[in-house]
Image (cartoon, coloured by chain):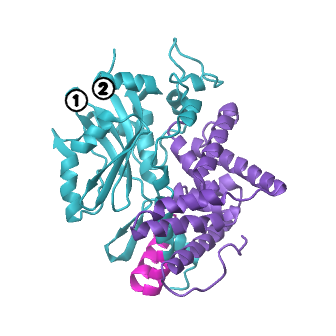
Chain colours: A purple, B cyan
Amino acid sequence: MVRILPRVQRFAYALTGNLDQGDDLAQEACARALARINQWQPGTRLDSWMFRITHNIWLDRLRASKVRGEVVDIAAMHNLSGVDGRDVMEHRQTLATVMEGVEKLPPEQKVLIALVCIEGLSYKDTAKIVDVPIGTVMSRLARARKALHQLVNRESGGGPIAGSPIAGSKG
Amino acid sequence: MGNISDETLMAYADGELTGDERERIAQAIAKDATIRSRLNVFTQTREQLARAYDEPMQQPIPSHLMDLVVGKTGSAGLQSIPEVQPRRGRKVSIADFLQRWLPSGGSGFATAAALGLALMTGGVLGWQFRPPEPPAASHALQFVSLLDGRLVARGQFSNALTQLASGQQRSWSIASGKIALKPIFTFRTNSNRICRQYELSIPAGGRFSGVACRSSDGDWQIPVHVALSSEQQQPGNKAVPAAGAGGSLVDKLVDQLIDGDVLGAADETALMKHGWKPLP
């Protein structure tokens, strides 16, 4: 589990878009995993199981925050891109834009970005973790990445814009 | 050759295609610039996403997280795991636990025995700096040398392995940017050697994971060092997906080698003070 820890942490960070919240999420996921280690099925992948737990907690929190009407921590988001922006290198700006784009994605697309593109999981493992058919994983993921790509190229003054706004599409 | 959907191109970029279909897409990409630019959407986003979420993580794993899993004194945090019987007073370890339950091998590459052997014979599973651009290649020589057929860490690479606690990171500058190294954890092998798993990132954006084992001469030998990045862009615009297999290869090697638990911070500090010589 120690070996998986950095990945759980990064996954939680990608989902929440915020280091503190990511940490908090990762911590709860670890605590829950340890408490329920006997529910983990031997022979299945531990990392998938941990990602699944993390994802579930995150979804619970999203639901809860919707009920309570909590707002996104905008200060933290600004802080995040500010850190990158301090560097003059253009690619950092691009990466900050990418992260802002991920923030805007609907949750069901965001988790796919995190699992496939950031954690490098296969479509099959990803489909199992989020409990949707692999075809749905692929169509949502393709849509999310096209939106991100568009956003980055638009921000960097690149090519023309076409297609739907980034957060408008539902899988 | 028919239309190629975005999903298929994405699957190609992500290393999900095999056999004929993969070959068919590769040919289409080679022939058609439009398809190449469509593919680019997926190779680029993947590469950018992997980097974007890595940069801010370049800091030690928070101690509260580490404590939770490893326990402050080594393995205390996991001693409550059910279904694992301690053997003759040995500590119940994560590695034992994982090793006992995780499927061994089976994903199509080297067997456990072969992996174990790689270390003993100094076999090299792969030292992949990027396709050697001149600056990267010349700098590589400062950080690694070949000794009796074994790769050995040198210079800053070696210093960082010797001086950093797990979770700490050090970076240093070379002509093309910064190289950063972070030891992830330290463990003892079943032949009583001390090894450390580390992650290394290079200016071109690649990330690598490897294992360094302390020799009796005080060198850090590198039995395995593999790319973690999801794709490598090759000349001719042909994406060669590796789908992050490197990480699991390193994990498997560690699983085969490890004896007992990953070492806790206190044990690690003690080792560091003793020049990383295994304590009896």
Q: Position of residue B78 (x, y in %)?
A: 59, 26
Q: Residue at x 39, y 34 (%)?
A: B165
User: Relative to A67, is A145 above or below?
Assistant: below
**Residue A70 placement, left or right of B238:** right
Residue A67 against residue B30 in the figure, above or below: above
Residue B58 within the magenta-colored segment of the rendering = no
Left or right? Give the position of A88 relative to B57.
Answer: left
Q: Chain of mark 2?
A: B
Q: Position of residue A34 (x, y in %)?
A: 65, 32
The quadrant the N terminus of chain A occupies is top right
Q: Residue at x 40, y 85 (%)?
A: B31
The residue positioned farthest toward the left in the image shown = B148
Count of numbered marks: 2
B269 or B246, nearer to the observer: B269
Q: Quick check: marks 2 and 1 in contact, CB under 8 Å?
A: yes
Which residue does the numbered mark 2 point to in the structure image? B276
**Is residue B249 depicted above or below A95 in this figure?**
above
Residue pictured at 44% horizontal, 63% vertical: A86
Q: Which residue is mark 1?
A: B218
Q: Which residues are magenta?
A: B14-40
10 Å neighbourhood of mark 2: few (<14), some, or many (≥20)? Answer: many
Q: Is residue B128 visible?
A: yes
Q: Position of residue A67 (x, y in %)?
A: 84, 55
Q: Name the secondary structure under disc 1.
A: loop
Is B191 placed left or right of A33 in the picture? Answer: left
Three-letter code for the amino acid on which mark 1 is drawn: Gly
Q: Classify mark 2: helix, strand or loop.
A: loop
